[in-house]
Structures are given as C-alpha cells and as structure tokens.
Image: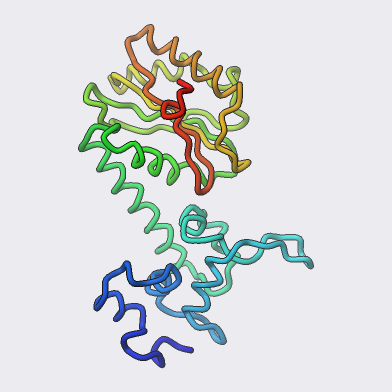
C-alpha cells in the first residue's frame, strides 16, 4: 500500500512527529529516509526487504536480498548498494551520508571527553569505520594526555601478523600526533571477534615498543559486523 493511502497516524513521517522516533520500527525509519518506492513495490516493502538477511541467487551465484538489519545496511559500502533495484545514486548517497554523520558524531564525542568515560562509544566508533570491510585493516586511535581522541588512522591492511604490522610505523605516527596513549583496533572479516594468538602476540609487541617512547597502549578493540571485543575489558592486555 502506498504511504499516501495509509491513515495519517500510520504514515511513518507523521507518526515520528507525533510520537517520536522510538515509536517507529526500523523499516518505518528507513522508509522516511528512502521517501519513495518503485513501481510495484511501496517504500515500506522496499525498506523491509533491505533489512532482511542476504541470500545467494541460485541462477547467478551472486549475493541477493537485503543487508541483515539496520547495522548491516549502514555498514555497507556504496558499491554493494548498487545491486538493489530502486536505490539510485541519490538514495545510496543518503544512506552513506547517514553512516558518515554517525562516525563524525562519535568522533566529536571522543574528542570532547575522555575516551574511557564511554568505552562503548569507542567500540561503536571502530565498528563504524572497520566492521564492514572485506579485508583485515589495522587502525590506531591516537589520544592526548587526557585520553581524548586526536586522530584515527588506518595503517595496515591484508592478513595481519607481527610481520605485516610494523611497530616502527606505529611509533612514528604516535610521535607525529604527539600522542600520550593509543587504542589499537582491527577487524575480523570472518565474523568472530575472539582474538587469535597472533593478535595477542602483536598487542604485546606494540605495547612493549610504544612504551619505549612513553606511549601507553590502553586497549585493543576487535570488531566484526554487529560485534566488538575489548581486550582490556577481557583481561587480555
């Protein structure tokens, strides 16, 4: 049913204004962002399909279906969104813009207050940057003496081992930012956030190396879509 044919109090935009965003389902909030559907498919149906789990098209062998919820959709890159009929350049740009606004809002929060006043914000921030990437990425959050965010940089990518993450480069970037502390971060495209022995060994190597220039390693955060693990919170640092 087209949105215009719904009762006024059931239309997502009017419902949001009257009752607040918490009263809306995920598909209704997404429908407000998408605004219109396509021929034969209303915007609410389109929104709901985008939130369904992905599947494999038996004819082409390619990924089809949705993105498994709001988090999956907003962690998806512009190229993946192109496969959805009805998501033109304008709609794809709006979805990507929402994700970028979320990143910037969290970055502002981490710059204005001590990082570990809000450890969940740190994990969310790293998730927004790294969780959806199809390859491993190693990043570092550089912090000032008050543990506020100075910068986040993606330094290495590929299969991450002690051999592929160069402590010297991490030290140089920490000195460049005049950082007093760092939070290490990387993603696991496999979907598991449990640290491997290689992750633990790499963390200890960087912790020892950075201590030589009086830079503390406060945490190592591992993320995957919908998940995040703090090695510090789990006693692994």
Numbered marks: total: 0
60 lies above or below 206:
below
| Residue 50 picture location, percent across and down | 54, 68
Q: Is residue 104 left or right of residue 59?
A: left
Rendered-image quadrant of the C terminus: top left
Name the residue located 58 percent from the left edge and 73 percent from the top edge.
85
Q: Residue furthest top?
A: 212
Name the residue located 40 percent from the left edge and 77 percent from the top edge.
35
| Residue 201 picture location, percent across and down | 56, 17
Name the residue located 44 percent from the left edge and 43 percent from the top edge.
129
Location of residue 149 (image quadrant): top left
133 lies above or below 212:
below
138 lies above or below 217:
below
Q: Is residue 30 left or right of residue 113?
A: right
Colour scheme of the rendered structure: rainbow
Q: Nearer the viewer, residue 228 or 183?
A: 228
Name the residue located 50 percent from the left edge and 39 percent from the top edge.
223
Location of residue 49 (image quadrant): bottom right
| Residue 186 picture location, percent across and down | 50, 33
Location of residue 198 (image quadrant): top right
| Residue 107 picture location, percent across and down | 30, 42
């Amino acid at each position: 049913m087209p949105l215009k044919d719904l009762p006024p109090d059931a239309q997502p935009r009017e419902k949001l204004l009257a009752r607040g965003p918490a009263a809306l389902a995920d598909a209704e909030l997404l429908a407000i962002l998408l605004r219109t559907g396509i021929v034969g498919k209303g915007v609410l149906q389109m929104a709901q399909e985008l939130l369904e789990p992905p599947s494999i098209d038996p004819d082409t062998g390619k990924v089809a279906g949705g993105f498994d919820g709001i988090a999956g959709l907003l962690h998806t890159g512009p190229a993946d969104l192109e496969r959805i009929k009805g998501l033109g350049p304008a709609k794809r740009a709006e979805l990507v813009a929402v994700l970028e606004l979320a990143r910037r809002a969290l970055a502002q929060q981490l710059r204005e207050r001590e990082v570990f006043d809000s450890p969940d914000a740190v994990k969310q921030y790293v998730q927004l940057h790294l969780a959806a990437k199809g390859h491993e990425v190693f990043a570092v959050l550089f912090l000032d003496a008050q543990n506020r965010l100075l910068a986040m940089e993606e330094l290495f990518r590929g299969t991450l081992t002690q051999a592929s993450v160069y402590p010297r480069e991490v030290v140089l970037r920490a000195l460049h930012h005049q950082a007093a502390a760092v939070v290490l971060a990387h993603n696991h495209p496999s979907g598991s956030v449990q640290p491997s022995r290689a992750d633990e060994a790499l963390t200890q190597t960087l912790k020892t190396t950075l201590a030589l220039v009086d830079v503390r390693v406060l945490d190592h955060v591992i993320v995957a879509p919908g998940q995040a693990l703090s090695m510090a919170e789990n006693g692994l640092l």
